[in-house]
Structure formats: structure tokens, C-alpha cells
Image (cartoon, rainbow, N blue to C red):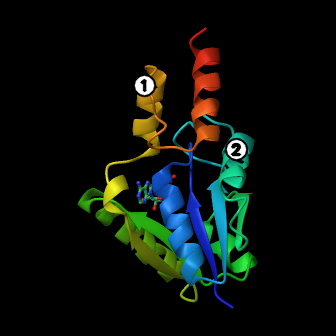
Amino acid sequence: MAIAVYPGSFDPVTKGHLDIIERAAHINDQLIVAVLVNSAKNPLFTLDERVQLLRECCKDMPNVTVESFNGLTVNFAKAHGATVLVRGLRAVTDFEVEMQLAQTNRALMPEVDTMFFVTSINWSYLSSSIVKEAACYGSDVSKFVTPNVVEALKKKYKLLNK
Ligand code: ADP
């Protein structure tokens, strides 16, 4: 059985992430979306909020689960019996970092390998940061994120801008 882990910050989950989740779930038996606890990125959403939003988005995908994790991705993968790490590639700018990450992970744990998905053209420009920037200034981001995330962003910025 092929178990895959898709690690990331998901702050918040976008339609670009969901596209990768759907495609990865299609070719693996089980997909665990793993939300990183110790993000150096000072996240907008708490860990629980990021997990909750993802769970709502993936509720109709029977072979997808969402969990949080702390520490090294390869250790999380091994502990869950996963042999595949899923990552998405948007532009060449992603490539250098992702290659380094994949090579390091493989050196640390050769039995876990990385599978890359090239973004669908619709989402090639999309990132959580861009969504947050647009939402912060009141733009409509419903093209980029699901309705639950639109609402969560509205609430968050209402609180922050008070
Ligand atoms: P991280 O902080 O680990 O980069 P992200 O949540 O930003 O976490 O992204 C997780 C993964 O999803 C990364 O592999 C990233 O390249 C990929 N990703 C993010 N946005 C998109 C998108 N629009 N299309 C395809 N892949 C994406």
C-alpha cells in the first residue's frame, strides 16, 4: 500500500494546494496532509485553525487525512509507514529549494522518496502569501481559496485590523 505525506505550512490552504492533494490522492492509496508546527514563517493562522480548514476542504476525499507535525518530515513519514513525500512545483524559483530539500531528505532516509507535481496552469502564480496580502486589503479572494477559508480570512483580518 502506497502511503504518501504532503507536508507544508498551509497558511492557509489554497486551491493550488487542493489541486495537488486531489492529484496525489488519486495515485497513492493513502495521503496524509501534514501541517508543520514549527513554521519559521510566523503564521497568520494557528496550527489548529490550519488543520481545521484543511479537514473541511478534504472531508469528501476518503483516502486523505490531515495531521499536524513537529520536527523532521522524514521522521513523520517513517512513523506513519509512508514511503512518498509529495511536493508541488510552481515556477523555476521553487525548483532550487525543492531539489535541495528532496536531496537532503533522501540522504537522511533513502527509503522515503519525493514525488513532485507540477502546478496546474491556473494556480501557477498562487501562494498562501499572495492570498493573505490580497485579503488583508479587502480584496475578494474567492477565486483562490474555498468559502470556509474566505470566511476565516475575513474574521482574522477584522480582528487584526481592529
Ligand atoms: P512550505 O512552507 O512547506 O513551502 P506551503 O504551504 O507554502 O508550505 O506549500 C506546501 C507545498 O505546496 C510546497 O511544495 C509548495 O511548492 C506547494 N504549493 C504551494 N502553492 C502551490 C500551487 N499554487 N500550486 C502547486 N503547488 C503549490
**Residue at the (63%, 31%) spot, across then down:** 151
- Label count reads 2
Q: Looking at the picture, how far across and down is residue 143, in whole percent?
A: 44, 41
Q: Could you classify mark 2 by the number of other residues whose Cα lies within 10 Å: few (under 14), some (14-19), or many (20 or more)?
A: many
Mark 2 CB within 8 Å of ligand 1: no
Q: Nearer the viewer, mark 1 or mark 2?
A: 1
N-term-proximal mark, 1 vs 2: 2
Point out which mark residue 108 bears: none
Q: Quadrant of the N terminus?
A: bottom right
Secondary element type, mark 1? loop
Amino acid type at circle 1 is Ser
Q: Looking at the picture, how far across and down is residue 134, in whole percent?
A: 41, 29
For label 2, the residue is 47
Q: Could you classify mark 1 by the number of other residues whose Cα lies within 10 Å: few (under 14), some (14-19), or many (20 or more)?
A: few
Which image quadrant is residue 70 in? bottom right
For label 1, the residue is 139
Q: Using the numbered discs, state the Cα–Cα distance from disc 1 to disc 2 in whole angstroms.
A: 24 Å
Secondary element type, mark 2? helix
Q: Nearer the viewer, residue 36 or 29?
A: 29
Q: Quadrant of the C terminus?
A: top right
Q: Nearer the viewer, residue 124 or 109?
A: 124
Q: Nearer the viewer, residue 36 or 162?
A: 162
Say if 102 sits above or below 119 in the image. Answer: below
Say if 64 sits above or below 30 in the image. Answer: above
**Residue at the (72%, 83%) spot, across then down:** 81
Q: Nearer the viewer, residue 86 or 131?
A: 131
Which image quadrant is residue 67 in? bottom right
Say if 116 sits above or below 29 in the image. Answer: above
Proximity of marks 1 and 2: CB atoms separated by less than 8 Å: no
Say if 105 sits above or below 1 in the image. Answer: above
**Residue at the (67%, 59%) spot, across then down:** 58
Amino acid type at circle 2 is Leu
